[in-house]
Amino acid sequence: MRDAPELLPGTLEMLILKSLTRGPMHGYGIAQHLKQISEDVLQVGESSLYPALQRLLKKGYVGAEWAVSDNNRRARYYTLTRAGQKQLESEKQEFDRLIFAIHKVMQAS
Amino acid sequence: MRALFRQLEYWFRQSQQQAELTEEMDFHREMKIQELQARGLTGDEAARAAAREVGNTTLMREESRAVWIPAALESVWQDLAYAARMLGRQPVFTAAALGALALSIGLNTSLFTLFNAVALRPWPVKEPRSVVDVQNILAQPFGDHSTTGFSLAEYRFLKKESKSFSGLVAMREEEVRLGDETAGRRSRAQFVTGNFFDVLGVPMALGRNFLEEEDQLGNPMAVGVLNYSTWRSRFGGDPGVVGRVIKVDTVPLTIVGVAAAGFTGTTPAIHDLYIPFPALALLRPGDNWAASFLHSPKQCCASVAGRLLPDATKAEAKAELEVLNKQFRDAQGDKTAGVLLSGTGFITKPGAKREMRLMFALMFLGVSMILLLTCANVGNLLLARAAARQRELAIRRSIGASRWRVVRQLVTESLLLAMAAGGLGVALAIWLPGFLLDKTLDEVLSFPIVPDATVVLYACGLSLFSCLIFGVLPALHGTRAPEASVISTSASISPRFRLRNLLLGIQVSLSVVMLVAAVLLFRGVQQAAELDPGFRVRGVSYLSLDLPADMYREDNLRRFSQQLRLAVDSSPLLREAGLTWLVPLSDSHASTGFRLPEETEDKMRPILFHEVSASYFSVLGIRSIAGRSFEPGDHDKGSIIINETMARRLWPGESPVGKTIIAGTPRLVVGVVADAHTGGLEPVQPTFYEPFPQHALPKFLVEDARLPATRVALDEILRQTQPGGSVRVTPLSANLERSLRGLRMGAGIAGALGILALSLAAIGTFGVFSFAVQQQTRELGLRVALGARPVQIVRFVLRSSCLPLAVGCAIGLPGSFAAAQLLTSQLYGLNPADPLTYALVLALLGLTGFAAVSLPVRRALKIDPTVALRWE
């Protein structure tokens, strides 16, 4: 199996924020979501997921509260805050610009 | 802001956050296991695979935590926790160091609290920085007075003409009788201009400020504003006090307001009541002085203060006021040397300011020495501890800690110690200054002497500074030794040892200085108590008359005084009583200006004078040296009697009897009496005595044998002429006690500081010698094994550490002589070269030194060579 590709720095936070636009999720759910949507390309390790979540909490982009999960277990659910939404918006634009730029460089002969 | 809040929340809920994170991880792992099981793995396999995938949860937790708490901060926290543990593990050392440091920082902070309250704190008014105190500089400085206030007329002129101030106020304090008070201190009223509270920005707690119509000279109204603390203490905080009519000097006065709690007044003494100036005419009816004070351009003095306009500078205001002041004085034909503008504060007179600064400088010198001494001592203790911890430190360094990291650890410990001591010091400063002042002063001060933000800042600075001295040097020193040698405990005299000796030398010299100062002060008190004041104190009392308040009416006073005088002169018993205004040792003086007949006007200089009857000298036992005592008729002739000092200064080698001086009018010297310390225990000043005037109210000095009869006679006179008056008796020795009290307190404090210094030095000496013996145990053992006799061992131990003691003494003695000179300039009666003092100090030091050294030496003598050589 190929190693999961290294993410560009800072993109993990953006991906988490994007995932949360679908509604509150717990950490495991976020990891699963990323994995499914990316068709197993993005395998986010717990060792980077949880610190990233803490960073987002600290910046106030996500909120967290404990709730009961689908299988009746207590889990911490993360939600996108208004500040998180704004941040996602600006990061997305920045990311698009970056990708576009990289793309152009790669296309140039 | 919200980010900070989130951060704080995290800090406070750290352990919960950790638990939540763990729970979250567990959830994650279980979900993973379920997922793997769903794919067909067995429970065990799934659990192992999940654990593998999740990886190092501890690291992850650490990383999550690091998001919130930066690593550097974390390590500082670790250092602090470790430091606290280390300190806790050695409770004796910690208690000793903490106690000594807290005491010295507390002493320093207490003194600073006092200094801050008395000298630095501005008036408790709105925006005190823009308020200035205005004083008139005297063209001819007179005695202690180089500045005065202004006449009310001049104040009104300045207020009308000046453009630099948004408001100018004038005030003057007068003693009054409030209500029917019969005991305790007399109340103080501050007479003020109507704009007083407006200009100073003082709100009212109750009622209202003065109205414009209450500040009209032509239409005086008896109204007053109460001080907040007086309202609380005398009126029980009665909310209905506004509108109440109280009696002030028996005149009914309406309370219109109570000033805000924060306004404690413009002087250290409490002003119970604020009254507009015009009401003075009602409270002192028929008093010529009051009338002239309110109207005459020449009748000094009211204090003046003003609030500068925002765009006016002090210099501009001063220039403007000087022009106006000169203009006003010129019109009066008076001279002036300009005006002085200073910030507000309790002490604004330039002379008093200088004197106070010097006193405080001396005291600060004393407590700073104690602090340095403590730092040296604690530094030495830390050095010893660093030596004991050599192995620990060496191991830390050999497993990779940088020297800087180890130093940081050691300094953190010192800092923790210093800050804890600083906290305790501030606690001491809350209590100590108030306690001491309570013991020394007769009355309550208007302002609280408690530490404020400035003081806390000062204590922090002091703690940091002391940490720098006692902590950083030993830390640098303690980590300097190469690791290998330390781990193998070979010890001889190391550089660390030299630092210890240096610190010991400093301690010894400082304690010599402190001890000499303390003993000198003690001797000073002793001498003052034994001082022959030049007059009889024991067995003499004075009687004074308490009269109803309408005695301020000059005609009443004159009438009564004359009746009294007639009665006194016709009674053989009362003629034997010494009449005077100024009771000996009452700390008050009367002075006037004088010159010799052949000198010009501008040679006028101040001199003390006493108005007394002939019996004054006989009752007090003041010897006549030449000439005669007073006789009837001397008052009209302008006869005076002078004291020896005045005779010696003015007419050295000549007989003064028959000479003349000009003090207002020509005065003829008819006699000379021996010097007497009637003014206080300071050196005797040139003084002249003049006959007690007919129209003034005397106090009666009598020997105790005649006291009952005199009292009866005075009571009888009062009953006939002044019903409502009463006689009060005070022994002179009470005054002596009061004069000595300040000195005793000073000596007590100095003594306590001296003993503290001595004990600190003793502990230091003991520490150094013990350490020397411990360090040299092997060598001593070797010497004993090779047959050294006990004397040689003692000599060996002493040799290494006696030098700092000797050098310390050698530096301390001249230092203490200089300190003694300084002290003598401030306190009368001390002899800076008092041989007994130095002998006593050396004996004390010798004894303490002996005690401090003998224990380690005895331990050295008991060293068993077989044990010592196996030391390792």
Image: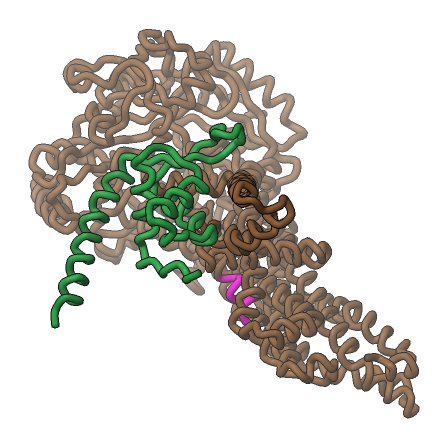
Chain colours: A green, B brown
Quadrant where the C terminus of chain B is found in the figure: bottom right
Q: What is the residue that sits farthest to the bottom in this orientation? A: B786
Q: Nearer the viewer, residue B204 or B59?
A: B59
Tell me what residue is drawn at x 56 percent, y 44 percent.
B40
Tell me what residue is drawn at x 40 percent, y 36 percent.
A25
x, y (%) of residue B249? Answer: 37, 16
Q: For residue B105, say whether it is visible.
A: no
Q: Number of callouts in the render?
A: 0
Q: Main secondary structure of the magenta part?
A: helix
Q: Nearer the viewer, residue B66 or B704?
A: B66
Q: Is residue B623 left or right of residue A102?
A: right
Q: Nearer the viewer, residue B368 or B663?
A: B368
x, y (%) of residue B629? Answer: 49, 42
Q: What is the residue that sits farthest to the front in this orientation? A: B40
Decide: is B122 above or below B171: below
Q: For residue B506, say whether it is visible.
A: yes
Decide: is B72 above or below B491: above
Question: Where on the picture, by quarter, is residue B177?
Answer: top left
